[in-house]
Image (cartoon, rainbow, N blue to C red):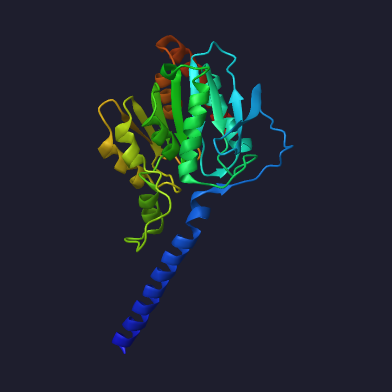
């Protein structure tokens, strides 16, 4: 009787495992890419001046972009590649961390996101990122450009950084690669097929000739911290991996260590000290409001 019960349980587990394979295979595109559409007449609203426009790809696909100009004396450019969900209406708010430090910010919506046309594609996203970079280098210098990736966008940013000159590569909540992330998220030990997407930070980062900064939180439930820490083994002496204790996937900017890291990388020493005091005051105010 016990053997029969164990046999039934074993068959059920096998069926569930096979079903999990099917879900991963069929649903991988909708898991990796989660765009939200915006109508062409949608009007963005942000708390600072910005320019909205379109840039056309080599295959005639218009990509929607936002270009924020800092009101401070310009120190450089943040070329920002956003995460796998939503669109520029959400991600545009990330500009504040950079424009207040004197950096212009340029970000595009990937194909199929927001007002951008086309279908999602890993290869085309790489090509579009390179096209946008080449376009921006007509206005900015590579030595004042920070390539910045957030979540899914870290794979785009690291790929671009492995191909073009820049000052720094900054990766917020990165993963090792999409296949390894799938394995960690759903606890699959083996897949009988190759995933359609790779976004291989683990292959790209060693090819980046300038400093790389990685910031990740220990309580990230989207990209598990254990997955990101695999990148530590491929970092060079010029690179750094910064752990934010209790940091989650979407709240790292609220931590003082994150803001201090931005200060250290983006600002001259004098400006960094001034802004550090401003950030400290802001954080104290927010903490007092939370207590109330």
The quarter of the picture where residue 55 lies is: top right
Q: Residue furthest bottom?
A: 1
- Looking at the image, can residue 179 be seen? yes
The answer to whether one can see residue 280 in this image is no
- Please state which of residues 116 and 99 is positioned toward the viewer in this rendering: 116
On the image, the x and y values in percent for residue 202 come to 32, 41
Q: Position of residue 34 (x, y in %)?
A: 55, 49
Q: Quadrant of residue 58?
A: top right
- Which quarter shows the N terminus? bottom left
Residue 253 position, x and y percent, is: 49, 31
| Residue at 57%, 37% in the rendered image | 109
Q: Is residue 134 above or below residue 271?
A: below
Q: How many marks?
A: 0
Viewer-proximal residue among 221 and 36: 36
Extreme residue toward the front, this view: 59
Identify the residue at image location x=45%, y=30%.
Answer: 148
Position of 115 relative to 148 (above/below): below
148 sits to left or right of 45: left
Residue at the outermost right position? 41
Which residue is pictured at 50% across the width and 46% down the height? 121
Residue toward you, 167 or 279: 167
The vertical placement of 243 against 101, above or below, is below
Position of residue 17 measured from the top left corner of the image (x, y, whole percent) = 39, 69
* Residue drawn at x 36%, y 55% as measured from the top left: 183
Residue 287 shown left or right of residue 1 in the figure: right
Q: Quadrant of the C terminus?
A: top right
């Amino acid at each position: 009787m016990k053997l029969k019960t164990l046999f039934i349980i074993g068959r059920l587990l096998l069926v569930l495992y096979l079903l999990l394979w099917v879900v991963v295979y069929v649903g991988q595109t909708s898991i990796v890419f989660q765009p939200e559409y915006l109508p062409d007449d949608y009007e963005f609203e942000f708390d600072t001046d910005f320019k909205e426009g379109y840039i056309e790809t080599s295959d005639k696909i218009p990509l929607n972009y936002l270009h924020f100009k800092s009101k401070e004396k310009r120190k450089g450019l943040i070329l920002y590649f956003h995460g796998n969900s939503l669109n520029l209406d959400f991600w545009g708010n990330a500009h504040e961390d950079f424009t207040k430090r004197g950096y212009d910010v340029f970000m595009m919506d990937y194909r199929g996101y927001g007002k951008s046309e086309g279908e999602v594609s890993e290869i085309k996203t790489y090509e579009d990122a390179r096209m946008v970079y080449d376009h921006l280098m007509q206005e900015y210098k590579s030595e004042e450009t920070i390539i910045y990736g957030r979540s899914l966008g870290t794979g785009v940013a690291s790929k671009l950084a492995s191909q073009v000159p820049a000052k720094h590569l900054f990766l917020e909540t990165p993963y090792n690669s999409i296949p390894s992330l799938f394995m960690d998220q759903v606890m699959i030990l083996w897949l009988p097929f190759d995933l359609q997407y790779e976004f291989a930070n683990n292959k790209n980062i060693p090819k980046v000739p300038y400093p790389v900064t990685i910031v990740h939180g220990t309580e990230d439930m989207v990209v598990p911290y254990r997955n990101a820490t695999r990148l530590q083994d491929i970092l060079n002496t010029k690179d750094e991996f910064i752990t934010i204790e209790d940091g989650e996937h979407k709240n790292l900017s609220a931590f003082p260590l994150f803001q201090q890291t931005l200060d250290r990388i983006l600002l001259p020493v004098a400006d960094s000290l001034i802004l550090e005091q401003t950030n400290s005051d802001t954080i104290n105010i927010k903490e007092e409001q939370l207590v109330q």
